[in-house]
Amino acid sequence: MHITLVTCMEMPGLLPEDEHLKSALQAQGAEVAVAPWNGHFAPFAATDLVLIRTPWDYTGHAEKFAQWLDRLEEAQTLVSNPVALMRWNMNKHYLVDLVRVGAPLTATAITAPEARDILSAAEKLGLQDIVIKPVISAGSKGLARLVSPDHDTLEKALTGITCDMLVQAFVPEIETLGETSLIFFGDKFSHAVVKKPKEGDIRCQEEFGGSATRIDPPAFAIEEARKLLTLLPSAPDYARVDVIIRDSDLILMEVELIEPELFFRLAPEAASLFAERIIAN
């Protein structure tokens, strides 16, 4: 089996954690290549499976990325995750879809990237402390927390943003409990990490001073996250469910189905579990 791991022109090589995955796939007998999604298309037309890993620049080129997904579909290339599922997950409108079928999301609205529209949405939701982020984004790009926002503050926060905005109630537990990422391969739970921002920030990514620590989450959280996966339009091969875990319930933050960091550096044995899942399918 020939598998092509997808990167991007900005970062064409594999991250160290995906070297674990490459080795695990090779141990299963696969031939593994690496190619950026926005490079030549030939590697993707000639492979048995396209496995999306780090196309991290796609949010700045969403239309071209969608066209690339279309080409994969037209070429009848096997893709993981499925193209239709990734296309749905590209835009944070998917969170509204999940709320409609019962996902435990904090108060949420989607508006045009205009200060007056965001203020109106916050007022309708009864919110004074909000988080805003573009509906097409990754890595906290465009993310801002605003307390009692005014028009001028919002205008500044929206500089350079042209897509719709997600408006949500700020969840204070992000600062104390942190955000937990539960990683699944199919419906099988693999491992979890808790990500915490540095003091005075809400961004959990390590490049912003955040930390990530492997944990054993409570059983109820694993089961609730697994139930969330059943609400998706189709079953994923892999998923990262980001939640805030409280004493007896959880709040959904994101379901990452395109290019989630899977934290193999904290759980290197999980790469073998993922490789087994991929080869078996």
Image (cartoon, helix red, strand yellow):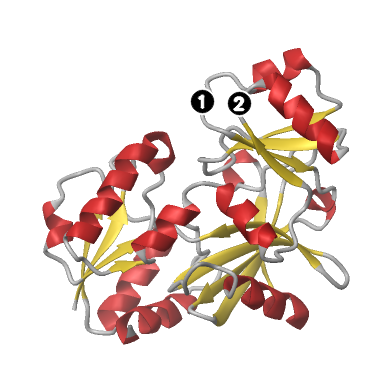
Taking the spot 43% from the left edge, 74% from the top edge, the residue there is: 237
Residue 173 sits above or below residue 219 on the image: above
* Residue where numbered disc 1 is placed: 162
The one nearer the camera, 16 or 263, is 263
Q: Quadrant of residue 215?
A: bottom right
* Residue where numbered disc 2 is placed: 113
The residue tagged with tag 1: helix, strand or loop?
Answer: loop
Which quarter of the figure is the C terminus placed in?
A: bottom left
Mark 1 surroundings: few (<14), some (14-19) or many (≥20) residues within 10 A: few
Q: Where is residue 96 drawn, in percent x and y?
A: 64, 52
The residue tagged with tag 2: helix, strand or loop?
Answer: loop
The extreme top residue here reads 152
Q: How many marks?
A: 2
Please tell me which of labels 1 and 2 falls first in the chain.
2
The one nearer the camera, 155 or 70, is 70
Q: Quadrant of residue 49?
A: bottom left
Residue 42 sits above or below residue 63 on the image: below
Which quarter of the figure is the N terminus placed in?
A: bottom left
Query: Which three-letter amino acid code belongs to the residue tagged 2?
Result: Pro
Q: Where is residue 216 drawn, in percent x and y?
A: 71, 77
Drawn side of residue 278 relative to residue 218, left or right: left
Answer whether labels 1 and 2 touch (C-beta < 8 Å). yes
Q: Where is residue 42 drawn, in percent x and y?
A: 11, 54
Taking the spot 39% from the left edge, 66% from the top edge, the residue there is: 81
Q: Is residue 218 visible?
A: no
Mark 2 surroundings: few (<14), some (14-19) or many (≥20) residues within 10 A: many
